[in-house]
């Protein structure tokens, strides 16, 4: 039997580490070779539309990009109010009456005031999209990628249906909440953690890894973003760390480049090399901490010119192995 593969990919990480960018790259990667993916935004900031240079996303799913090998990426901006109307219709066949509730402000009340309600609706929508089938009983999307809340809120976000299942002790809402919870805690859902090779993001990823695991959620891959190239070969990094870089070689290099090898210049370069070596050493320590998670690790390069559409596809090229690794 084929192993169970994750179909819902939740992308979290410390704020600003590149969740939106990496989620978009992952959606492209998962769509390659003729697959169809859905990329969902939960926080209504239109980051995805900006990234793909398309008009703002709405609650109506829309094709936003193609992937190598005739793949397709669809986009969706999740909206708690729209999701609630869908829910009401599903459970109570409210149809137009739901719209009336909307007009009198009940929907607004439920989605903004009731604690956790918003998260229930959003995870419920992700669940629905992931399991949706067409007339031939084929999945509409091979994978759904969620540009999810940051690490500080991710466990709560994914766990909120457990609370609902506890509150509504029976009936359709209880059953639905139980199914969503079961799906989110099954191997069909993977929570990927985006991090940088810096202390704070790695610490947050470690905390999230522990918390998610304790809650029975599956951590997928660790996605290390904005990785900078080492500027010196390993041997010279070692020498720089030990303060043993050869002044004469540097001076000769400067002369060869047509520059005057004055002492101050050579000294400044040595200092730079030492700083660089120190940064590489710190990054190595962070890498070690990430290995401790025991999860597959993928590294994405820092794009020095920023992330344009071409850059996004380049990043996707580094994520081709994620589907098979989680
Ligand atoms: N690999 C990369 N190379 C260069 N720049 C990057 C890379 N990944 C992300 N960025 C840039 O870093 C910034 C933050 O990225 P992004 O918006 O994806 O982060 P985020 O985690 O979604 O942020 P927020 O927490 O605000 O939602 C953006 O300007 C983005 O273009
Ligand atoms: Mg974002």
Image: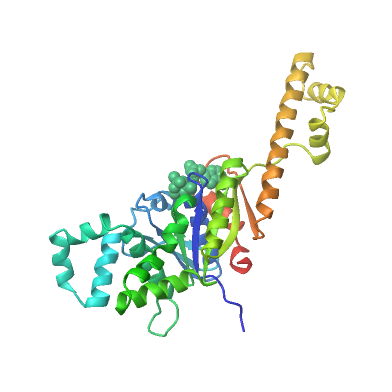
294 and 325: which is toward the camera? 294
33 and 210: which is toward the camera? 210
- Residue 78 appears at what percent x and percent y? 34, 60
Query: How many numbered circles does the render carry?
Result: 0
Quarter of the image where the N terminus is located: bottom right
Left or right of 315, for residue 148: left
Quarter of the image where the C terminus is located: bottom right
- Residue 190 appears at what percent x and percent y? 53, 65
- Residue 292 appears at what percent x and percent y? 68, 55
What's the coloring here?
Answer: rainbow
Residue 107 picture quarter: bottom left
Q: Is residue 191 above or below residue 237?
A: below
153 and 147: which is toward the camera? 153
Residue drawn 36% across and 78% down?
A: 175
Left or right of 279, for residue 90: left
Q: Is residue 239 above or below residue 176?
A: above
Residue drawn 82% across and 21% down?
A: 251
- Residue 173 appears at what percent x and percent y? 31, 74
Q: Is residue 281 above or below residue 55?
A: above
| Residue 74 can be seen, yes or no | no
Residue 41 picture quarter: bottom left
């Amino acid at each position: 039997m084929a192993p169970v593969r994750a179909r819902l990919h939740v992308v979290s990480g410390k704020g600003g580490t590149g969740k939106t960018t990496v989620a978009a790259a992952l959606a492209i990667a998962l769509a390659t070779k003729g697959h169809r993916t859905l990329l969902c935004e939960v926080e209504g900031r239109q980051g995805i539309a900006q990234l793909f240079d398309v008009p703002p996303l709405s609650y109506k799913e829309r094709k936003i990009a193609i992937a190598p090998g005739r793949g397709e990426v669809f986009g969706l901006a999740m909206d708690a109010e729209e999701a609630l109307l869908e829910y009401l219709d599903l459970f109570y066949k409210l149809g137009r009456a739901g719209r009336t509730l909307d007009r009198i402000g009940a929907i607004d009340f439920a989605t903004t005031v009731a604690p956790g309600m918003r998260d229930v609706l959003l995870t419920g929508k992700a669940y629905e999209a992931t399991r949706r089938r067409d007339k031939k009983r084929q999945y509409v999307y091979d994978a759904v990628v969620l540009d999810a809340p940051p690490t500080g809120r991710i466990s709560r976000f994914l766990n909120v249906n457990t609370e609902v299942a506890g509150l509504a002790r029976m009936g359709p809402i209880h059953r639905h909440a139980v199914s969503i919870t079961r799906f989110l805690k099954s191997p069909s859902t993977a929570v990927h953690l985006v991090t940088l090779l810096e202390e704070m993001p790695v610490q947050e990823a470690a905390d999230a890894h522990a918390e998610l695991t304790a809650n029975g959620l599956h951590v997928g891959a660790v996605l290390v973003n904005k990785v900078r190239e080492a500027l010196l070969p390993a041997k010279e990094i070692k020498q720089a760390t030990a303060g043993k870089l050869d002044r004469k070689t540097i001076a000769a290099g400067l002369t060869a480049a047509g520059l005057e090898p004055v002492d101050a210049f050579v000294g400044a370069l040595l200092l730079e090399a030492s700083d660089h070596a120190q940064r590489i050493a710190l990054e190595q320590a962070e890498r070690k901490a990430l290995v401790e998670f025991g999860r597959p690790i993928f590294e994405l390069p820092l794009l020095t010119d920023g992330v344009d559409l071409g850059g996004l596809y380049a990043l996707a090229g580094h994520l081709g192995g994620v589907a098979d690794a989680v």
